[in-house]
Amino acid sequence: MFRCCAVACRLLAFWLVLGLLPSSAQLDEDDESIPDKVGAEVHLTKQERSMLKKLECSLCKAVITEMHLEVEKHGMTQKGVGSEMKVIETSNAICLALLQKYSLKLPAAGASGKPLLEKKAEDEDDEMAMAASQNSEGGPASFMRAMLVLKMGCQRWIEDFGGDTSGFVFKSVQLGTQSASGAAQDYCVRSAGLCGSGKKERKQKEREQEKTREVKRSEMRRKEDTAAAKAKKDDPFSAMPEDSKFGIQRMLEMARDDPLHYMEDDAKERVRKGQADLKCDVCRTVLDEAFQEVSKRPKSMRSEHDILGVVEGLCEGGQDLSVPSYFGVEPPPLPPVWTDRWQPKLDKQMDKYHLRPLPKKAAKERRAWRALSAEGKQKPPPPGQSETDMMLTLSCKDVLDPARFTEKLFESMQACSGSSEADSCNPALDAATAICRSSDGATCSFGSAAGKAKEDL
């Protein structure tokens, strides 16, 4: 009687270590997801790890077989969305099934021999096996150790192959073309390469391929390190102290947020005066630029949405590729494309800036400069040109209202297309007359004749 109680106590403790008995919290939460690992981690000896290596084929077939049977038994592939996740959870718990249905026989310590993974008889349970181990070599301790080794071996096998295993079993059961043993043979021999006569050759080939890949990776890392070292050497700020870098970053941010911040006072005054004086002329010019761009397109691409895409980019000329970004601060964009054809001119008698066409020679040089900017090969414009570009760009940003400009230009284009005088109709001028305002808020006047007004500009 006492012996039976002792066996039962040892078995109970053993089940708790393996994780075969639920805790009180687990009993209260039956609907919780299955944990990734069960039971306690066990340190394996070198001999035990070597034996598990020899069991890879048997362990693979046992895991695939049991998973296949469980998935098929519970119809997991027929439960709609999320059914594959149920199969993945099955792979987490499959080691419990192996401990209940299989036994591991290990050779005695120091003895040669091959470990055996055998399926238990249908009517055999752990208590019977524990009692039977009383008369075997090593006793119950050896039996418990073998089960722990099996648990750890299964757990590590699932960590290595669990993802592929779940997908394979799900597809196999879903197709229904293989039995559990057939699926195990297919996966373990053909897919995983853990069984079969060519196992050693496959392992050797994999090692050679991995070695080749590692050589390529080392070469790629070497090239990356060389490129990084060169970039660091070419970076003029790499040797600077961190506080100096922060100061430069702040200066770049201020120049980006306030383009006039670092200009001379007299240059600031000229830019601000031109920015205000040119509002009417710039407003008319950008509307004309948008109309000319849209008019080149097929009629199917002249919708209000299409015009909006053109109008939104009228105050910028694209990214400046000649200047890299430093400390995460992008350089200011290039001046608008239409500034390649127009320049501000100061009328000294009226003390007011007006927009005038750029002289032919200057326009040609500007077009060449713009062509080089596509690859970032352009040189910085001279100081006077930078000042006029700033004047026109800031004035453009002051007057541009993309939604309002688009709506009015589209209405004017529609009105002109249905007019009996369509040839003499000027949608850009009509839109400008309706929406353009000077710096004091007055309606801009562009003259009575559309053609004459365009020539004046």
Image (spheres, rainbow, N blue to C red):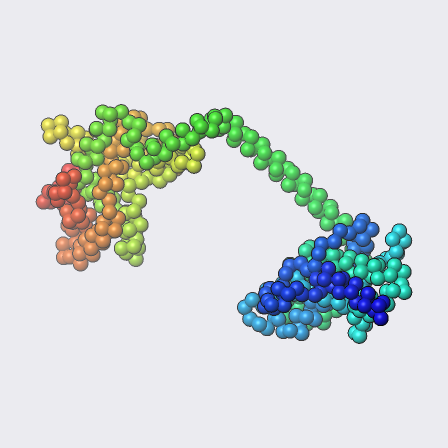
Q: Residue at x 54, y 29 (%)?
A: 230
Placement of 318 over or under 83, stated as above or below? above
Position of residue 273 measured from the top left corner of the image (x, y, whole percent)? 19, 32
x, y percent for residue 301 = 30, 55
> Which residue is more in the foreground, 181 or 7?
7
Q: Quadrant of the C terminus?
A: top left
Question: What is the quadrant of residue 314 in the picture?
Answer: top left
> Residue pushed farthest front?
2
Q: Residue at x 67, y 42 (%)?
A: 214
Q: Position of residue 242 (x, y in %)?
A: 47, 29
Q: Residue 60: tell me if it is visible.
A: no
* Residue 404 spot, x, y in % from top left: 22, 51
Between 103 and 278, the one lying in front of the other is: 103
Q: How many marks?
A: 0
Q: Which quadrant is home to the N terminus?
A: bottom right
Query: Could you tell me which residue is drawn at 31 percent across and 50 percent down?
Result: 309
Residue 116 placement, left or right of 261: right
Along the line of sight, which residue is nearer the eye, 419 or 286?
Answer: 286
Q: Locate residue 58 relative to residue 109 in the image: left or right.
A: left
Q: Residue at x 50, y 25 (%)?
A: 239
Q: Report the front residue among 2 and 282.
A: 2
Answer with left or right where residue 116 lies relative to residue 408: right
Residue 439 visible somewhere in the drawing: yes
User: Which of the 4 quarters of the picture holds residue 439?
Assistant: top left
